[in-house]
Image (spheres, rainbow, N blue to C red):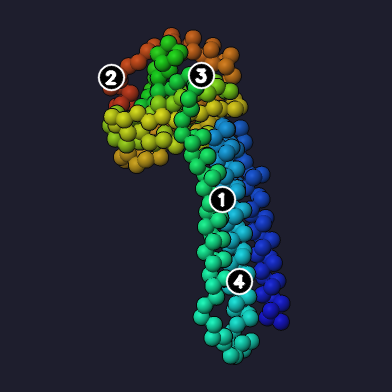
Amino acid sequence: MIKTRLFSLISRLCAAAAFLTFLPGTAHAEVENLAKPWQLGLSKPGSPAMEQIVDFHQTLLYIITGIVIFVLVLLLYVMIRFNKKANPVPSQTTHNVALEVVWTLVPVLILALVVIPSMRLLFFVDRVEQADMTLKVRGFQWYWAYEYPDNGGIAFDAIMVADEDLKEDQHRLLDTYNPVVLPTNTTIRVLITAEDVLHAWAIPSLGVKKDAVPGQTNETWIHIKEPGKYYGQCSELCGDGHGFMPIAIHAVTPEEFKVWTEKAKLEFGSVNDNNKDAVEFAQNTAQTAGGK
């Protein structure tokens, strides 16, 4: 009776594990790539890099699920087969060379199989040799500044929208007064640095997370596949306003991007390295949002 119940429990656990394993691939956020209530799994990938990250994540999930089920079955089998009642006279065996070789080689082989796609993915997301355009990103306390060197040197500051200025289609703590506008189907080199303390420029749905270090320029790249809104936040503790320096990207078609660049040249102008008003406004916005 007990054995029947235990094996019934094992079958249910296996079914639940299989269900959870396959479910994340179907539970994606919608157009704006925001997490939804009761969502399982990762957001819908918006770039080739994130697509490969999701695929690798799913592969690891299958492997881990199989290992967990296998170990669980072994433990339950040992508990049932070799308990005191079922096995009153325990075996005196202390070594089994074949078994020891197997449980040493199998994990090594599993790790070797994981290393190959892992290294391939690391090199793929690292940097790009040929880019269609460049975006420069600088982190400040507590906002981001952007520059388009290949598009007339357009430069502006992206400060979080204050609560009282939020519109119906905007999201608290995520939207900025000046979103980053980027073209789709374009390979974009992103150069990232900081002007004061450590920051991190991260957009989960695009598979990007890169540290912004004062005095150092880090490089990554993005290739946005579809128009839409992509959100991220600073992912490095950078002071009491850390939670109030979001990243908002509006991806548009290349034709729409050209139109935007012409308007942006008139609206923003070129690089401004001494924007004290932006610094003060960003700090005040962060303090207000934080309830200070």
Q: Which residue is mark 1?
A: 113
Residue at horizontal 67 percent and vertical 70 percent from the top: 9
Q: Which residue is mark 4?
A: 74
Q: For the residues carrying marks 1 and 3, which lies nearer the camera in this image? A: 1
Sequence-earlier tag: 4 or 1: 4
Q: Quadrant of residue 256?
A: top right
Q: In front: 186, or 36?
A: 186
Residue type indicated by callout 1: Leu
Label 3 to label 4, Cα distance in Å?
54 Å
Judged from the image, the secondary structure of the residue bearing numbered disc 4 is: helix
In the rendered view, would you say 147 is above or below 201? above
| Neighbourhood count class around disc 2 (C-alpha, 10 Å): few under 14, some 14–19, many 20 upward | few
In the rendered view, would you say 191 is above or below 39? above
Label 1 to label 3, Cα distance in Å?
34 Å
Tell whether label 4 touches label 3 (CB within 8 Å): no
Q: Which residue is mark 3?
A: 132
Q: Position of residue 14 (x, y in %)?
A: 66, 63
Sequence-earlier tag: 3 or 4: 4
Residue at horizontal 28 percent and vertical 29 percent from the top: 215
Judged from the image, the secondary structure of the residue bearing numbered disc 1 is: helix
Q: Which mark is residue 274?
A: 2
In the rendered view, would you say 168 is above or below 17? above
Sequence-earlier tag: 2 or 4: 4
Label 2 to label 4, Cα distance in Å?
65 Å
